[in-house]
Image (spheres, helix red, strand yellow):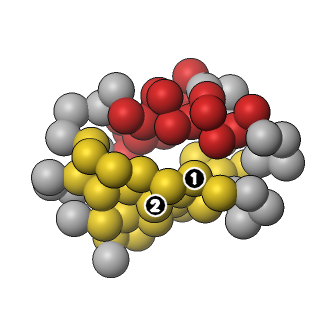
Amino acid sequence: MVQVYGLKGTSRAHFVQAVSCELKSLPGVGDLQAGLPSGKVTVNSEQPLDRAAVAAAVDEGGYELLGGEAQ
């Protein structure tokens, strides 16, 4: 399953490393891509991710989750 999330405060390159590390720690997450300047993260996972868990992981990385949608 592919889910795309928008994040707030992603103007620094630190965002890619910090958020990638935190999201990869979630169960079932395979590959992910995080990019500047879009501030979007595309996550491939075995099953839909719990939005609260994604928000907590993003917060731990120092950013804020704006939205997410399954594609």
Q: Is residue 36 above or below residue 56?
A: below
Q: Position of residue 59 (x, y in %)?
A: 59, 29
Give the residue pinned by disc 1: 34
- The residue drawn where x is 21% and y is 33% is 27
Q: Is residue 19 above or below residue 65?
A: above
Q: Residues within 10 Å of mark 1 (few under 14, many from 20)?
A: many
Give the residue pinned by disc 2: 42
Identify the secondary structure beneath mark 1: strand
Q: Nearer the viewer, residue 7 or 37?
A: 37
Among the two numbered marks 1 and 2 on one chain, the one whose residue lies closer to the N terminus: 1
Residue type beneath disc 1: Ala
Identify the secondary structure beneath mark 2: strand
Q: Residue furthest bottom?
A: 71
Q: Quadrant of the N terminus?
A: bottom left
Q: Position of residue 55 (x, y in %)?
A: 48, 39
- Can residue 56 be seen here? no
Q: Are marks 1 and 2 in contact (CB under 8 Å)?
A: yes
